[in-house]
Image (cartoon, helix red, strand yellow):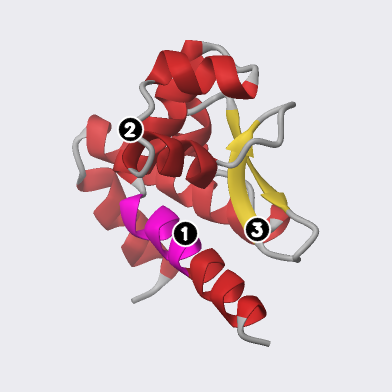
Amino acid sequence: MTLQELQEQVLQLPLKERWQLVQRLLGSIQQETTGADLSLADAQTFPQLQYRTGTSGQTNVSIKGKGIRVQTIVVANTDWNWDANKIAEEYDLSTTQVLEALRFYEAHKTEIDDAIAAEVASEEEAAHA
């Protein structure tokens, strides 16, 4: 398919679908050029979150300006049964920040679960070394 054919097909889409396509393309370009930034859609939906590379070299999603990882908030919520207010109090966050992190988790469950599993495996490996 040529670029012109692709353009013609895109122009036949309803305006809403064209806009969604533009947002996805911009998000993909942003990720490609800046590495591990949130996609454009995620940056708009989760403005208080960012990707950060930790001391281990692993990239995780965290609360902007705080460095608290989403996976830490998820573990506190799911494993320790802490509610959003308790998490906010313990980690010096706003309840809004905690709820946003939990919403991000629901939208990116596999990614966060994989990060938690990798950390648990790494800790177990270190304990047996």
Q: Type of residue at label 3?
A: Thr
Q: Is disc 1 surrounded by few (<14), some (14 to 19) or many (20+) residues within 10 Å? A: some
Secondary structure type for disc 1:
helix
Residue under label 3: 59
Q: Is disc 3 surrounded by few (<14), some (14 to 19) or many (20+) residues within 10 Å? A: some
Q: Residue shown at 75%/65% (left/top)?
A: 56
Q: Residue shown at 71%/28% (left/top)?
A: 66
The answer to whether the residues at label 3 and label 2 have Cβ atoms under 8 Å apart is: no
Disc with the residue nearer the chain's start (3 vs 2): 3
Which circle, 3 or 2, is nearer the viewer? 2
Quadrant for the N terminus in the image: bottom left
Marks 3 and 2, how far apart at CA: 26 Å
Marks 1 and 2, how far apart at CA: 16 Å
Q: Main secondary structure of the magenta part?
A: helix
Residue under label 2: 81
Q: Is residue 5 above or below residue 16?
A: below
Q: Which residues are magenta?
A: 109-117
Disc with the residue nearer the chain's start (1 vs 2): 2
> Where residue 51 sits: x, y (%)?
63, 46
Q: Is residue 23 visible?
A: no
Residue under label 1: 116
Marks 3 and 1, how far apart at CA: 12 Å
Q: Type of residue at label 1?
A: Ile
> Where residue 57 sits: x, y (%)?
75, 66
> Where residue 68 sits: x, y (%)?
64, 36
> Is residue 77 inside the magenta stretch?
no
Q: Left or right of 34: which side holds 125?
A: left
Quadrant for the C terminus in the image: bottom right
| Frontmost residue, 24 versus 36 | 36
